[in-house]
Image: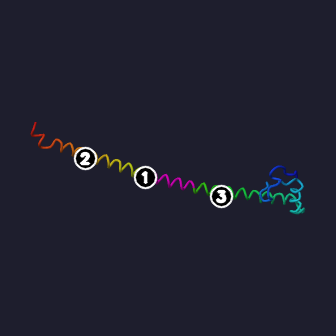
Amino acid sequence: MTEAFGPEKFAPPHLRTAQQPNDSSRLAYFHKRGQANPSENLTATVQHIASFSMEEIDRLMHALEGMRGLMRTEGERISREIAGYASLSHSAVTTMRILTDSIKEWNGGPDKAAAK
């Protein structure tokens, strides 16, 4: 290990960057696992490490499926909202036409018809 220089040298231990294990500490880890059959120990170690990746992939897939469901329900909700606004807009236009026609009839009422 090389000695840390700069601010890390004076930082409290819990704030220092983690030191990378050297080859001898890595070999010691495998040595502790037993010497009966190194290939079995290596296989078990690889499977143990791979299981973390598989669990993370499963969690990610579950989260993505949840997001897909959320996006689907939100899309359906937005479609319903748009349909509601379109219906409201159509009703407002129809109401305005009725009002306009009524005002035209009032402006051209019996007094104006008799004047012609």
Type of the residue with mark 3: Arg
What is the number of the mark on residue 59?
3
Q: Position of residue 98 (x, y in %)?
A: 25, 47
Q: Position of residue 69 (x, y in %)?
A: 54, 56
Type of the residue with mark 1: Glu
The segment highlighted magenta reads 67-81
Q: Secondary structure at mark 3?
A: helix
Q: Secondary structure at mark 1?
A: helix
Mark 2: give few (<14), some (14-19) or many (20+) Cα within 10 Å. few
Which residue is denoted by mark 2 in the rendering? 99
At horizontal 75% and vertical 56% (from top left) the residue drawn is 50
Quadrant in which residue 53 is drawn:
bottom right
Residue in the foreground of this view, choosing between 100 and 55: 100
At horizontal 14% and vertical 43% (from top left) the residue drawn is 109
- Of the residues under marks 3 and 2, which one precedes in the sequence? 3
Is residue 70 covered in magenta? yes
Alpha-carbon span between mark 1 and mark 3: 33 Å
